[in-house]
Amino acid sequence: MSGHSKWATTKHKKAANDAKRQKLFAKLIKNIEVAARLGGSDLDGNPSLYDAVYKARKNSLPSDNIDRAVKRGAGELGDGVEYHNIMYEGYGPAGVAVMIECLTDNRNRAAAEVRLAVTKNHGNMADPGSVSYQFARKGIIHLTGDVQEDQVLEATIEHGVEDIAAVHDGLLVTCDPSAMVAARTALAEAGLDYESADVEFVSSLKVDVDAENAKKVIALVEALEDLDDVQEVYTNMQISDEVMAEIEAQD
């Protein structure tokens, strides 16, 4: 789940089991195929493919799988699957706005499965535009480990960075999508290793939730993320330190 609550940066811990890891690998491969199909197989000339491959490597996707995905997407292994990008909108518990990004080869299946997951987890589907107006596309760079904010600021100050926020395992850098390649390149040149660089939907209207509703929203997001056609789920949920501590104490 994206949206940069503390939950968004801890969910990777839940990918430890084999089933979760295989689903993650499938999504990473699909991202690579689509990027290669749209922009070709040259990583240097296709920033979207570069970022998709970089993220796949960071998540330990085997090199052979990455190479095949690039070639399949670029049409070098015959005709690949044609994926459609679809965005669904809805509301979860406590009025939390939810945007669901799908890459699918079957629109009807995706629509039916998303609707079922939302309605079974205390949510409602919404008309196009009724939720998306709250969100804007942003470049998000996630740095982990012992990295200091002033180091990041010094490296990226001339590259359109809008915000640097601390999270439990590092920093999140927010910038305009058009500035993301320059920003992540500057970080790499400064010797600052980053975990991922993605264009995401970020809400300007956050909703604070209590522990009970936070757990319901998290369950909704996890149900959606378990669907093969769903690539990303974005929400405007904001979880305070106190609520996050309460949730972790209950786990």
Image (tube, rainbow, N blue to C red):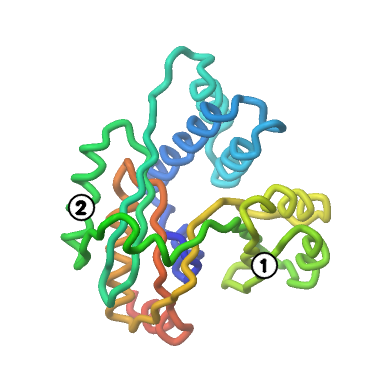
Position of 189 with respect to 5 (left or right) is right
Mark 1, secondary structure of its residue: strand
Position of 170 with respect to 130 (left or right) is right
Q: Which mark is residue 162?
A: 1
Residue 103 falls in image quadrant:
top left
Position of 233 with respect to 76 (left or right) is left
Instruction: Name which residue type carries label 2.
Output: Arg
Q: Which mark is residue 58?
A: none
Name the residue rendered at 65%, 64% in the picture.
173
Name the residue rendered at 74%, 50% in the picture.
182
Instruction: Name which residue type carries label 1.
Output: Glu
Q: Is residue 10 visible?
A: no
Name the residue rendered at 25%, 60% in the picture.
126
Mark 2, secondary structure of its residue: helix
Residue bearing mark 2: 115
Which one is closest to the eye, mark 1 or mark 2? 1
Q: For label 2, count other residues whose C-alpha is less than 10 Å away and answer few (under 14), some (14-19) or many (20+).
A: some
Q: Is residue 58 visible?
A: yes
Q: Position of residue 240 (x, y in %)?
A: 46, 83
**Residue 147 or residue 36, whichever sits in front:** 36
Looking at the image, tell me whether mark 1 or mark 2 is earlier in sequence order: 2
Total marks drawn? 2
Q: Quadrant of the C terminus?
A: bottom left
Give the vertical position of 33 relative to 129 (above or below): above
Q: Quadrant of the N terminus?
A: bottom left
Give the vertical position of 234 relative to 111 (above or below): below
Q: Position of residue 217 (x, y in %)?
A: 30, 69
Name the residue rendered at 64%, 38% in the picture.
50
